[in-house]
Amino acid sequence: MAKRKLKQFDEYQYGPRRLLRPGDRFRVKGGPIYTTDDGEKIPMYERGVFVFQKYYEQGAKRWIEAYRADKGGMAVLWMGRSMPSPHVPGLRRRPYRVTRKLRADRPSTQRRSRRRNSKAASPTPTRA
């Protein structure tokens, strides 16, 4: 069987009108799960905010290369079909799903803290 050619894209469409481009910040859900010999399921997925870099396809294999927004480490997010891992017994590759793209001007954590501080802050008294 011949190897399929690796295709590399600068965009990833995750919805009918939703598109990720390099530098876009986004969140994901889903990801791989490891099943022990006892039947216990251990989640092995990534969490947090990621910065999109590239999208790859090679036949049925599909994945996103992204960097963590807070720590800067690289993450490879599987986007293909759910399948057992060919290298690690007990590991099931479940696809990640992009839940939402974050606005570039304001991270979600700063927005929340500003709201709390603005409600809690009382007006500064003035001296006569």
Image (tube, helix red, strand yellow):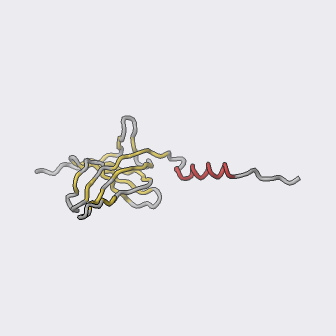
Give the image quarter of residue 19: top left
- Seen from this angle, which residue lies furthest right? 128
Q: Which residue appears at 23% of the width and 60% of the height?
A: 90
Q: Nearer the viewer, residue 62 or 9?
A: 62
What is the number of callouts on the image? 0
Q: Nearer the viewer, residue 68 or 56?
A: 68
- Seen from this angle, which residue lies furthest bottom? 37
Whole-percent x and y of residue 88?
A: 23, 62
Left/right placement of residue 13 relative to residue 69 reads left
Left/right placement of residue 119 relative to residue 105 reads right
- Seen from this angle, which residue lies furthest left? 1
Q: Which residue appears at 38% of the width and 57% of the height?
A: 46
Whole-percent x and y of residue 116?
A: 62, 51
Whole-percent x and y of residue 66?
A: 38, 54
Q: Looking at the image, is 13 positioned above or below residue 36?
A: above
- Seen from this angle, which residue lies furthest front? 38
Whole-percent x and y of residue 10?
A: 35, 46
